[in-house]
Image (tube, rainbow, N blue to C red):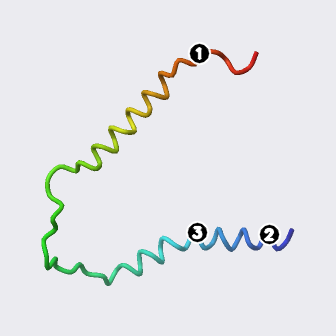
Amino acid sequence: MKISKIALATAAAALAVAPAAAQAANADRASAPATKSTKMGGAPIGAIIAALAVVIGAVVIATTGDDEPTSP
């Protein structure tokens, strides 16, 4: 019981300190200039197709013809 409380306190302290440590680590970083241009121009067709698939899936699930209750 005592070991689990110590482990819980250690995990909580690590979660509390992690954002400050991450912010301090990124202070000296600088961005590098891009040497080559990317070929991903235009409309984000993949994102549009994925969003459309999610909407169609939600509509199909919501409009299934199973109106009978599971329980008696």
Q: Are marks 1 and 3 in contact (CB under 8 Å)?
A: no
* Real-space Cα separation, disc 1 to disc 3, in angstroms: 46 Å
Decide: few, some or many residues near mark 1? Use Cα within 10 Å; few <14, some 14-19, many ≥20: few
Q: Does 50 sit left or right of 71 as displayed?
A: left
Q: Secondary structure at mark 1?
A: loop
**Residue at 34% over, 41% down:** 51
Task: Name above or below for residue 40 compared with residue 69.
Answer: below
Amino acid type, label 1:
Asp
User: x%, y% of residue 15?
Assistant: 58, 69
Nearer-the-camera pick, 5 or 51: 51
At 18% from the left and 61% from the top, the residue drawn is: 40
The C terminus - image quarter? top right
Left or right relative to 17: residue 34: left
Where does label 2 land, which residue?
4
Q: CA distance from mark 2 to mark 1?
A: 48 Å
Q: Are marks 2 and 1 in contact (CB under 8 Å)?
A: no
Q: Which residue is mark 1?
A: 67
Q: Nearer the viewer, residue 8 or 53?
A: 53
**Given the image, on which type of amino acid does mark 2 rest?**
Ser
Q: Quadrant of residue 6?
A: bottom right
Badge 2: residue crowd in 10 Å (few <14, some 14–19, many ≥20): few
Q: Label 3 belongs to which residue?
A: 15
At horizontal 51% and vertical 22% (from top left) the residue drawn is: 64
Element marked by disc 3: helix
Give above or below for 10 relative to 40.
below
Classify the position of the N terminus by image quarter.
bottom right
Q: Is residue 18 above or below residue 58?
A: below
Q: Residue at x 60, y 73 (%)?
A: 14
* Sequence-earlier tag: 3 or 2: 2
Disc sitting over residue 58 in the figure: none
Dividing the picture into quarters, in which one does residue 48 lie?
Answer: top left
Label 3 CA crowd tier, 10 Å (few <14, some 14–19, many 20+) = few
